[in-house]
Every structure is written in structure tokens, then in C-alpha cells.
Image (cartoon, rainbow, N blue to C red):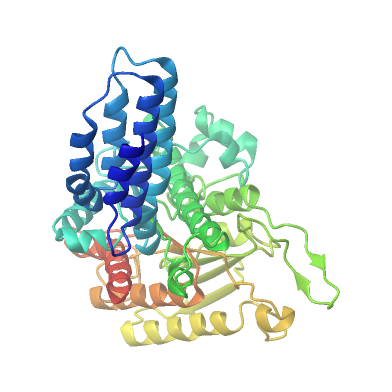
Amino acid sequence: MINILVEFWKLRKKSRPHKTEVMYRIMVLMMLLNQVATMSPRRDISLLLREHSCRSRRIRRNPCFVSSEFSACFHTRNVPLQRRKFAAMLKYSSHSASFVEADEKALIAPFFPIYYNDVYEVNLPPGHRFPIGKYREVRISLQSKIEALSQDEQSRVDCDFRISPLATVEQLITTHDEHYVQRYLNGKMTELENRNIGFPWSLQHVNRTLSSVGGTVAAALSAWEKYCKRHELIQKKKHNRQGSFEDTTHLCWSAHVAGGTHHAFKDYGEGFCIFSDIAVAANVLLQKYPAPALIQQSNNHTQKNQLSTPAIRRILIIDLDVHQGNGNAVLFQGEERVKTFSMQCKANYFSKKEQSDLDIELPVGCRDETYLSTLRFWLKNIENYPFDEDGRSDEVKSNTQKKPFDIIFFQAGVDIHKDDRLGRLSISTGGISRRNQIVFEFAHRMKSPLVICMGGGYPRDEWDPILKAHTNVYWEAHQFLSSLSKER
């Protein structure tokens, strides 16, 4: 046994060894001690020790190598049960230690999962005016652009494509009337109701509708849960790099290549919208991550209860579709935790105008310069005075470090495009790209996770301008996050 310890000690280096090497050496020693104690057949010790330097180099390239090698040492048919338990312990320990490095990289890289629901096909009647095929076209185009990036460029953003799950009834009734939900799901809607929505009822379309909501809910939850994980690790001081993680914690964005159905109300729909995906996602977040009770401290300052998981206190919806987000405006009237900002064409209402927390109307034929300067002004106003009546921000009033908004939804409709069939503005493709950049920069300055939804876009005979504008929203978000990752 003494000889074993001596040989093991000789493996140490003069310089500080890599942390995975340290774990490897400890586990080698544990394995050898276990083999000697149980007097079971073992591999030649000197050979095992000579292999150490080679294995160390492999560990540096692939931390997972540790657990796979030690598992292989023990998982044989004639190994006693106690040694299998010991192997499981080693596997658990090696995963815990060796994945620290992988976790660090995952924490640093911006997070950007992209959900899509074009797998749920709907056969609309011939000549129907809704461009149902755009969702697949946009997703394929976006996926091709991201896959064409080099490995280094792809690694800058933690991005993958995920199929949108179906929303549950429990999620839907956080926002919509249960009787309405059940009538739609079971095909009990009247002909007038279906005509007002704009779609004929079918089981195909039920699944498509549920995925439109479910994808946005999943996108919001994934972004917030990733944010919470990073926040928790910072709190536990597992990664003590001054300022590094604090600056990137909020770069937990997500997207849905669908959704943005902002014309749905509590118990009826209109304008191709049955349920409001953004409203349901916001309410699910509020329900799942409620704000704790505030406590009064001896210094007379109101502070939050310290929780490992951050709570949702305020949500902002930025709606830049050409039409007002009338459904969301009504659904969140009187709800102080959700603020709605809608900027739309003043001559493009197909139903009663509703009151958002902030409504900005633009003239017919509005062009890039007017549109972009207006958007910059109002986002800057929200940034400085986030919907406070007395003109002071929450941070000034409460003297705390509370963020004005915990998460932001971006309804990124492109029916403001000059070539859109239903829009009445004249914004160019480049103008829409600059609009996207303004919103991305705003979310980054606010240090809030961002959830992007598709919104409206209705091509004329030529689909390319609208498809390109839709694709650019997601592509430019990916490139914006990539640029931030590259800067670090």
C-alpha cells in the first residue's frame, strides 16, 4: 500500500495541476484503495499509473472522459455489488467536478433557444388569405443561416431549435375563460365566432393553436429558468469572477417562430387570434414565480425577501405590429405587474381601439426616419420613467436595486413593411432591422431576458420581402448576442 501511495505522489507536478487532473488523481487513489481492500482482480497498478499522464491530456480536452473511464473499470459482470455502488459514487463525483468547466462556459455564453411549430400542419381552404406557409419557410431559412456559421461562431451563443409543445388547459385558463377554452377545443364555436377569428375550425388547427401558445410559454419559461440558474450560481459564489457573470446573467433570451397573437380576448378571438400566447406566458410566469411579501427593515427601507429563485414582479410587452395589441391591452387592464406598450398605424384598426398602458399612433405611410425616432424616444422614456405617475423610476422611489422589468416580450410583427398586404406603413427592410436593433439594445440596457414572438406579416404575390423581414428578426437577435459574446 505504501508503494502505491509513493507512486501516486510522484505523479504530482511542480506547477499547479488542472482541477480535473486533481479529481482524476483522487479517484485513482480511491479506486486502488478499494481494489486492495476487496482483494479483487485488478488491472496492473504500474500500468494504470503510467497511463495517468496520457489520460490527463485527454481529460483537458474532454472532462466527460473521467466518468466514462471509471465506469468502464467497474461495470463488469462479476463485480461485487458494493463495488458497483462505489462506481456509481465515483461517476457522480466525477460528473459534479468535471462539469464545472462546462457549466462556466454555458453560463458565459448567451442563451437563445428557438421554438417552432410548423410540424403541426393545417390545410386551409384554397385561396385563404392567411399565409400559413410562412412559418416553415422562415424557420428553414433561419436554421440554414445559423448552421452555415463556423463552429467558433456557433459556440458563441447557446442556441438550438426546439419543437413547440402544446399548451395545457391549465395554462390557457390563467388568461382565458374556461368555458371559451373548452368550446374551442371541442369544436363548439359558432360559425360567427369562427368567421370573426378568420379560420375554420378543425382538429388540425386546434393543435396548431395550442402549439402557438405552448411554444411561447416554453420559450418564456426556458429563458427565465436559465436566468434563475445563473442567478443562483452567482448567489452561491460558485463562480467568483468579478463582474463577469453579473454582466451576462440577463442574456437569457428565447424566441418562437410563431405566436404574437395579440387580438385574442378573454372569451373571444379576432384577427387570426384565438388565444393570446404572450398573455398566457406572462400569466404562467407570474403564477409560477410569484413575488414574495415585502418586509420592512429597521432602516425603514423596503427590501425583498432573499430567495434562491428570483421572482417575477414586472413584465413589459413591446408590441410593434402594425395593428394595436388590443387583446393584450384589455387582458392586462388593472394588472400593475404587466405593462403594455403598443406602437401602431392610427388608421389600421379593424375593431374597437383599446387602451394600452402606452399607445403610440403613427400616420399612414410613415417612413423609416419617423418610425425609428419615435420608437427610440418612447423606449428611452420607458427606460427612464417606467410607467410611474410621478415621473420617477422605481429605483429612485424605493432606493433599491429592483429592475424596472424582470422579463420583456417583443411582438415583432413585420406588417409595418412597405410591401405588406394589410399594413399601411412604409418601413423598409433595413428600417425593420434597425427597429430590431433598437429593441435588442433596450433589453440589454435593462438587463432583462427577452422573449421574441413572430407577429403579423402578410405578403402580396411576392413573398420574399416579408419572409426576409421575419427571418431577420431572429437572425439579428442571434447575431446581437453573438457580438456581445465575442466582445468578452
Which of the image's four quarters has the C terminus? bottom left
Q: Tell me residue 463's x, y (percent).
A: 19, 58
Q: Residue at coordinates 16% horizontally, 58% vertically from top-left?
A: 151
Furthest toward the front, the residue is 2
Q: Nearer the viewer, residue 474 or 201?
A: 474
Q: How many marks?
A: 0
Residue 456 is drawn in which quadrant? bottom left
Q: Residue at coordinates 20% horizontally, 48% vertically from top-left?
A: 53
Q: Is residue 110 visible?
A: yes
* 474 to 29, vertically: above or below: below
* 1 to 161, vertically: above or below: above
Q: Tell me residue 284's x, y (percent).
A: 58, 48
Which of the image's four quarters has the N terminus? top left
Q: From the viewer's perspective, is 399 left or right of 216?
A: right
Q: Is residue 130 visible?
A: no
Q: Residue at coordinates 55% horizontally, 49% vertically from top-left?
A: 280
Q: From the viewer's perspective, is 214 left or right of 141?
A: right
Q: From the viewer's perspective, is 413 left or right of 275?
A: left
Residue 470 is drawn in which quadrant? bottom left
Q: Residue at coordinates 30% horizontally, 76% vertically from top-left?
A: 487
Q: Tell me residue 402's x, y (percent).
A: 64, 72
Residue 332 is drawn in which quadrant? bottom right
